[in-house]
Image (cartoon, rainbow, N blue to C red):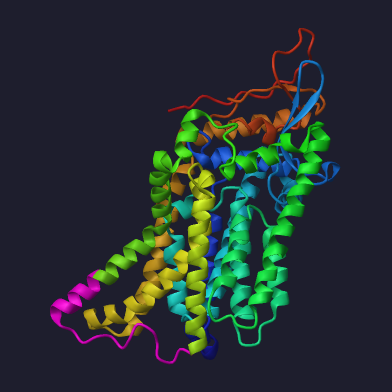
Amino acid sequence: MHRRLQALRTRHWPIGIAMVLAAVLVLSEPAIVDFFQKGHFNWVSLHSLAIARHSSLANGGVGYSCEWLTSDGSTHLEYFNRYPIVFAVLSRWLLLPWAGDGAAWLYAARQWMNVMFIATALVLWWWLRALRFSRPVAMASLLFTLSAPVVLKYRNMFHFDQPALLAYGLLLLVVVRKVLPDQPDLRWYWAALCLAALSGRSAVVLIASLVLPLQRGLAGRRRGLWLGVPIAFATVGVATAYNIVWEARLNAVSWTSTTVVQSALRRLGLSGNGFSERALERTRWLGGALPKLIAYSTEFMLPLLLVAAVLVLTRLVARRRRLSPAAGPIPPALPEQALTSRRQMLWSTGGTAVLWVVLMKNLFVFHVYAGMVLLPFLLLCMAHTLERLIPELAAALKRSERRVTQCSVVLAGSVLVIVLLLGPSAQLRPVGARRLVLQAFFSDLAAYRSGADAGVPVQRNDQWFPRSPYAQCALLDAPLLNGEPPADAQLSRPPAFPARPD
């Protein structure tokens, strides 16, 4: 028993920390979120869930947000899935047991995204360990990086960037384990590229496939890495073409008129259709784009900037006190292969991050949460910074390096829990009168859905939920009548969303 406890304390303590923090993350999830709040969370969650809800085999797994009925009796399917269908189809299947209860379905969706977030954290942990960072440095780096308020605020929002980040992390892990060693196995890399390209909003994977072969020190495998570029682009191209064909078929339109194509043109800056003049101004570099990109990127960089500031302050204090320098920024026992892998990953993730911000500018300026693909680069910078900070801080404080390391891990975990429970994500927990009226509404909604005829349409109302035009599409089973109803039209009437009580 003593040996087991000793092993847990010395070797397996990251497992204990991960289990505790995962439990806090899952147990702190409220049964109902505050739908009176402004922002992306409710809008994007309901929109993405509407797409997942309609990702049935009847339409090839290609989901859409809404089914509209026009006054002449024709049907129009609105806003098709722009990304590979794997995540949407899987989510629809996983959430199907709760589909009859709106509140339970939304709660299960948020917990599903919490599972994705935890899985992403584990993959990034393994990636740092593969780069030969110590357990304490890897754990502290991960916890500090994920404690950014913007990260924890959107961690449980249902959207297509979280699976893409998980796939990107797995791709980076495969690169370190199977590509960078002296005897590479590029088959793992090609397979990981295919899976990552099918994960979700996979632009970051495409960019990474272009950046990685440009690294130095890849003699003998550069040709195989360049082969990954057409593999990744072809995979995304086939998946996108599949969605386009299904949308064109179901809506009886040309492929150039599909929402998938029009959205891609807008995001790449090749078309302004669908953007208001105010939105177009926001996408211009010398208009509103540059300030937004800086502000949104800084939100993700906040923990790194704070830790870097502590490092600078520590060095200033050490210089003022004329303390002896630390043993060195990098442990001397670290193999040259690990140092080379770190440099290659730093340049690869950094180049990918910069190119992503530039190429996906029209997405990022409207959706701050999409910047989560920057996290691997910021995490690696954090690990390098902490690896230098800990010995220098120990020397400045005249404490053992082990004690400072332990305190760093405890501090990082504490910061994450505090931001989780008291930060921006806490604003989504309804309290008092808001919680009561929302519980009553979802109870009425469940009773309505249990007795409603799915074939009877509902009058479309973009304001049914506050600031969420797709709420009816996600939470109701009936088609939506778009426009003025005929005089003899039979309509189903769901319960009205309550007025804000405070």
Q: Nearer the viewer, residue 140 or 168?
A: 168
Residue at the outermost right position: 58
The number of discs equals: 0
Residue at the outermost top position: 487
* Residue 466 is a magenta residue: no
Instruction: Tell me the residue at 58%/25% (across/down).
Output: 463
- Image coordinates of residue 111 in percent, x first then y, are 61, 53
Instruction: Tell me the residue at 14%/80% (across/down).
Output: 321
Instruction: Tell me the residue at 54%/50% (across/down).
Output: 360
Please provide the residue range marked out in magenta: 313-335
Q: Main SS of the magenta segment? A: loop
Q: Nearer the viewer, residue 122 or 483?
A: 483
Decide: is 253 above or below 298.
above
Residue 485 visible to the viewer: yes
Residue 115 visible to the viewer: no
Decide: is 200 above or below 279.
below
Q: Nearer the viewer, residue 357 or 46?
A: 357
Quadrant for the C terminus in the image: top left
Quarter of the image for residue 384 reads bottom left
Q: Nearer the viewer, residue 214 or 128?
A: 214
Quarter of the image for residue 322 reads bottom left
Quadrant for the N terminus in the image: bottom right
- Image coordinates of residue 404 in percent, x first then y, are 32, 78
